[in-house]
Image (cartoon, rainbow, N blue to C red):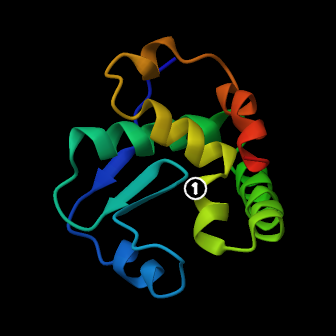
């Protein structure tokens, strides 16, 4: 894994616009083969968004967004809070947990996000 990387667009307004309707302040967003970042992308953010890119690849893009939304709603009703629902989403938990590991993308197993589904309950 890790041999394909998303295309990164720095200094984008897309994260700014998305922040208006999100429970968090969005710095970068991954959608399909693209990553848009507010300013210059840091190595940590690049790894975080590349993890999302691989999650999307292995779920054929559309399924990842369906599952992401479903996990988000489950988290919202479980915890009663949109921000907590975001941070407990298995896709986000995998990305945040491993964003500092420079070798994670290379050693990441297929569908590793499944291991983090239990985070919805915490």
**Where 82 falls versus 84 (above or below)?**
below
Q: Residue at x 77, y 37 (%)?
A: 118
Q: Quadrant of residue 17?
A: bottom left
Dividing the picture into quadrants, the one containing residue 106 is top left
Count the numbered circles shown: 1
- Where residue 16 sits: x, y (%)? 35, 79
What residue lies at 67% left-to-right and 33% top-to-bottom? 113
Classify 81 as above or below 65.
below
Q: Nearer the viewer, residue 106 or 79?
A: 79
Q: Position of residue 42 (x, y in %)?
A: 21, 46
Q: On the rendered structure, is 107 left or right of 7?
A: right
Q: Is residue 36 visible?
A: yes
Helix, strand or loop at mark 1: helix
Q: What is the x, y in percent for residue 78?
A: 82, 63
- Position of residue 119 relative to residue 37, above or below, is above
Asked if one can make out residue 59 in the rendered structure from this viewpoint, the answer is: no
**Among all residues in the image, which is located at the extreme bottom?**
20
Whether residue 107 is situated above or below residue 53 in the rendered picture: above
User: Looking at the image, which is closer to me, 18 or 80?
Assistant: 80
Q: Position of residue 7 (x, y in %)?
A: 36, 47
Q: Residue shown at 30%/78% (left/top)?
A: 13
Residue 55, located in which quarter of the rendered image? Answer: top right
Residue furthest to the top: 107
**44 left or right of 107 in image:** left
- Residue at which label 1 appears: 87
Q: Residues within 10 Å of mark 1 (few under 14, many from 20)?
A: some
Left or right, 83 with reference to 26: right
């Amino acid at each position: 894994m890790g041999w394909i990387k998303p295309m990164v667009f720095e200094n984008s307004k897309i994260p700014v616009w998305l922040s208006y309707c999100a429970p968090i302040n969005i710095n970068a967003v991954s959608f399909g083969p693209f990553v848009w970042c507010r300013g210059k992308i840091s190595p940590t953010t690049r790894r975080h968004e590349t993890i999302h890119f691989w999650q999307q690849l292995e779920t054929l893009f559309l399924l990842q967004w369906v599952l992401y939304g479903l996990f988000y709603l489950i988290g919202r009703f479980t915890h009663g809070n949109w921000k907590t629902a975001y941070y407990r989403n298995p896709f986000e938990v995998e990305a945040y947990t491993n964003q500092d590991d420079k070798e994670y993308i290379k050693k990441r197993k297929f569908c590793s996000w499944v291991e983090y589904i239990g985070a919805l309950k915490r």
